Image: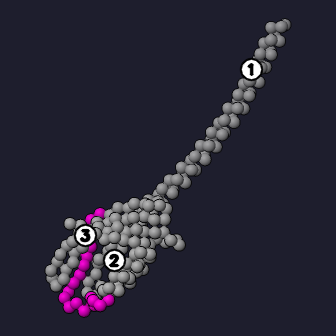
Amino acid sequence: MNKKILALIITGALLIISLVFNVLLTSAVREAQSEGEHLQKEKERLESKLEASKENNEKLKVMGEKFVKTMFTFDNQTASDVKGKLLEQVKGKARSKLQEVQKTTESYEISKIEAEYSSSVKIKESYFNRIDEDSSLVTIVFDQALTVGGNKTVSQYEMKVWLEHFEGEWSVENYELQQLL
């Protein structure tokens, strides 16, 4: 009889231990599933943020290229419109620079030039560097073809365009132009 009671006690103890482990394992599995779901949601959120950042980066690169094209694409009929178009794209130091150039060139009436002239741009390469969440630098290497009275010259330049995010939109904050040899 002692063996039967001992066997029942051991069986009961094993059953209780089995139930405890089952409860613990079930709890651990649920916790792991919950953590897995949380990690999946976090992964999806980060992938979405990365995709939005890539799209934004491409837009900023295009914005820097647009600034270069606006500045260096003109002819006899469109030259007077360039200043206004540029001022729409800029703030800060870039605006001050453009206004200073405008002051120093007001005495030179470009519209009084009698020869046919035109300027065009060919972007060779551009690349983007994010400085922080609200600022970036776009570097553009381009050729400017300037034709005056039938004589054409091509010069290569590099322009660095600093973009700032302010009040919900991006604008050109500053720029530097360097002629490449």
User: In whole angstroms, how far apart are the C-alphas of marks 3 and 2?
Assistant: 18 Å
Q: Amino acid at mark 1?
A: Leu
Residue 31 visible in image: yes
Q: Position of residue 65 (x, y in %)?
A: 34, 70
Quadrant where the C terminus sits is bottom left
The residue located at (36%, 71%) in the rendering is 175
Residue 86 visible in image: no
Disc 1 vs disc 2: Cβ atoms closer than 8 Å?
Answer: no
Q: Position of residue 79 (x, y in %)?
A: 30, 85
As drawn, the label of residue 177 is none
Secondary structure at numbered mark 2: helix
Residue in the foreground of this view, choosing between 109 and 28: 109
Q: Is residue 157 above or below residue 28?
A: below
Point out the frontmost of discs 3 and 2: 3
| Residue 138 falls in image quadrant | bottom left
User: In whole angstroms, how far apart are the C-alphas of marks 1 and 3?
Assistant: 85 Å
Residues drawn in magenta? 106-125
The residue located at (62%, 43%) in the rendering is 35
Q: Amino acid at mark 3?
A: Gln
As drawn, the label of residue 179 is 3
How packed mark 3 is, by other alpha carbons closer than 10 Å (few <14, some 14-19, many 20 or more), is: few
Report the residue marked by disc 1.
14
As drawn, the label of residue 70 is 2
